[in-house]
């Protein structure tokens, strides 16, 4: 069956939709706060789902829990924040394109640390992906789009986001390789670790209440909830399914 492949494609589609929403939210909410908000909402949704399914006891070793938490701290806590900064700098279209570097980076990291083999076709795909991203990023963007004409900060954040996502993905795959855990649980552990990192980072910036003030807007909060439901709750759940079955 193609369960893992279908889950991966569906997750990518949902992330593309949520990226457009996050691009609009980035004009009013800082990347750290936006990431914290969508992570907190996703935790509530996943916890509710687990309660409704009476799935309260994950079968995970301590080693697997450690790698899932670390993958969430890096991939979600740091990687997603960098991705939101890339969206603000490059725009949703080019930031999403930068994120397409994550799968090739995942393959390379898995080759280095998990011993997974790369076929000639896979190597060609990696080369074409990198070349395509470089070509589009090099294009000039009309000033009317309201995007920075200095792309290098955005490229830096985009590369950091892709590296964070790739590193987190490899750690998660390694943790799930020999387990039968529900992907909801692995997703929850990753998001909890990411949110813990974000709480620390937001606190270090000070004036926490002032940072959270934009979320008082009912209109903005509605969009945050929708983006979190699509891109984090469903997206991360499906991502974990794809890691488990591919």
Image: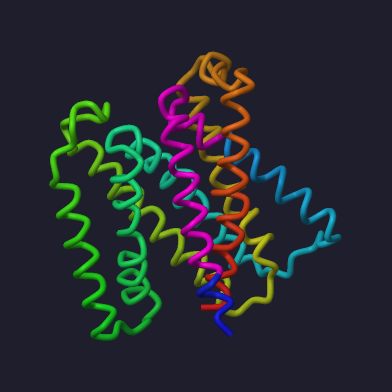
- x 64%, y 45%: residue: 42
Magenta residue check for 199: no
Rendered view: 119 above or below 219:
below
Where in the figure is residue 215, as x and y percent of width and height? 59, 22
- x 50%, y 74%: residue: 5
- x 18%, y 39%: residue: 152
Identify which residue, 133 or 64, lies in the foreground.
133
- From the viewer's perspective, is 237 left or right of 118? right
Where in the figure is residue 47, as x and y percent of width and height? 75, 49
Where in the figure is residue 149, as x and y percent of width and height? 17, 31
The magenta stretch is 7-36
- From the viewer's perspective, is 149 left or right of 233? left
Q: Quadrant of the N terminus?
A: bottom right
Magenta residue check for 32: yes
Rendered view: 229 above or below 27:
below
Where in the figure is residue 175, as x and y percent of width and height? 55, 70
Name the image colouring.
Answer: rainbow
- x 16%, y 62%: residue: 131
User: Magenta residues: mostly which secondary structure?
Assistant: helix
Identify which residue, 197 or 12, lies in the foreground.
12
Identify which residue, 203 or 140, lies in the foreground.
140
Identify which residue, 16 or 199, lies in the foreground.
16
The quarter of the picture where residue 58 lies is bottom right
The quarter of the picture where residue 30 lies is top left
Rendered view: 64 above or below 194:
below
- From the viewer's perspective, is 154 left or right of 184? left
């Amino acid at each position: 069956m193609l369960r893992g492949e279908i889950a991966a494609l569906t997750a990518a589609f949902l992330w593309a939709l949520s990226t457009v929403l996050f691009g609009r939210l980035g004009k009013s909410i800082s990347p750290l706060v936006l990431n914290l908000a969508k992570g907190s909402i996703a935790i509530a949704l996943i916890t509710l789902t687990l309660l409704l399914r009476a799935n309260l006891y994950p079968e995970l070793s301590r080693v697997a829990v450690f790698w899932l938490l670390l993958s969430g701290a890096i991939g979600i806590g740091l990687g997603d924040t960098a991705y939101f900064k890339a969206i603000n700098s490059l725009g949703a279209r080019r930031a999403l394109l930068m994120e397409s570097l994550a799968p090739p980076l995942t393959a390379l990291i898995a080759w280095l640390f998990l011993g997974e083999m790369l076929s000639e076709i896979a190597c060609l795909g990696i080369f074409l992906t990198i070349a395509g991203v470089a070509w589009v990023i090099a294009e000039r963007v009309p000033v009317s789009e309201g995007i920075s004409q200095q792309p290098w900060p955005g490229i830096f954040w985009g590369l950091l986001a892709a590296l964070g996502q790739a590193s987190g993905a490899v750690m998660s795959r390694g943790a799930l390789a020999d387990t039968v855990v529900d992907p909801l649980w692995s997703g929850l552990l990753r998001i909890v670790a990411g949110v813990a990192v974000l709480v620390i980072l937001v606190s270090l910036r000070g004036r926490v209440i002032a940072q959270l003030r934009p979320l008082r807007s009912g209109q903005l909060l509605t969009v945050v909830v929708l983006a979190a439901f699509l891109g984090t709750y469903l997206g991360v759940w499906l991502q974990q399914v794809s890691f488990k079955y591919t």
